[in-house]
Each structure stands twice: as C-alpha cells, then as structure tokens.
Image (tube, helix red, strand yellow):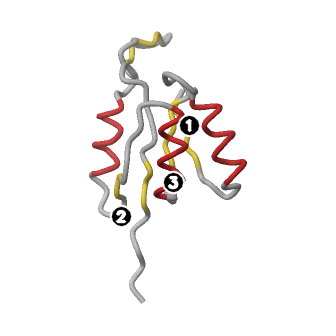
Amino acid sequence: MKKRNPIIGFLVTHPNRGAKKHEDKKRKSKMPTAGQVKRLLEQEDNMQVVCEAESGEKAYQLFGEHLPDITVMDLNMPGMGGLEAIKRILARYPTAKILVLS
C-alpha cells in the first residue's frame, strides 16, 4: 500500500506578517512572510499546501472543509484571531495538529 503524502493546511496569516523587524542581541532578523513559509512547505515532496486563510473565521471554516493533517496558524490575524480559531478548531476536532506562528 502506497503511503500518502501529509497534507498541510496553511490556514494563516495576517497579510503584513513578517513586516516588522525583530531585534536580537547578536543580530537583526526579519520574520519570514507568509509567502516565504508557504514556499518552504511547497518545496517538500511529501507536503502539499491545500488552502490559505486571511482571518480566524476563514481558517475555522476551511479547516472543517479540508481536515488537514497539520495546520500552520498565525496568532495575529484580522477578525477572530488565531488563538480563538485554534480554540474553536480543537473544541470540534480535538485531534487537530496545529503549529503556531507568533
């Protein structure tokens, strides 16, 4: 039986993610943008990005439609934030696997 590829539900992020520079004691670094994270995931042969959302409401809706193996969620989104979306997803789908960006 052929092993199926994991599906990544890319249910994130605020449109301006990665716009702020974050200071580090040793160096200045910039947070990756949503597009950069998506491109990294899409480069992997065993991963597929199935959808994107720009708000927590849309993330919750799309999660129910796609039931991804893994979800990447930004906490800072317009409308219902990522934390509330995560709470609602886990209440309905307790085995959901969610990677959080902050």
Around disc 2, counting alpha carbons within 10 Å, would you say few (fewer than 14), some (14 to 19), or many (20 or more)?
few
Name which residue type carries label 1: Val
The residue at 65%/32% (across/down) is 84
Tell me: residue 21, above or below residue 91.
above
Q: Secondary structure at mark 3?
A: strand
Q: Which residue is at the front of the view, 25 or 81?
A: 81
Q: Are marks 3 and 2 in contact (CB under 8 Å)?
A: no
The x and y percentages for residue 23 are 46, 10
Report the Cα–Cα distance between label 1 and label 2. Answer: 20 Å
- On the image, numbered disc 2 is attached to which residue? 46
Q: Secondary structure at mark 1?
A: strand
User: Which quadrant is home to the N terminus?
Assistant: bottom left
Name which residue type carries label 2: Asn
Give the mark nearest the N terminus, 3 or 2.
2
The residue at 63%/39% (across/down) is 86
Tell me: residue 56, above or below residue 22.
below
Mark sitting on residue 70: 3
* Closer mark to the observer between disc 3 and disc 2: 3
| Residue at the far bottom in the pictured view | 1
Q: Which residue is at the front of the view, 78 or 101?
A: 78
Report the Cα–Cα distance between label 3 and label 1. Answer: 11 Å
User: Which quadrant is home to the C terminus?
Assistant: top right
Report the Cα–Cα distance between label 3 and label 2. Answer: 13 Å
- On the image, numbered disc 1 is attached to which residue? 100
The x and y percentages for residue 26 are 45, 13
The residue at 55%/43% (across/down) is 60
Mark sitting on residue 61: none
The residue at 36%/32% (across/down) is 34
The x and y percentages for residue 80 are 57, 27
Instruction: Tell me: 94 left or right of 85.
Output: right
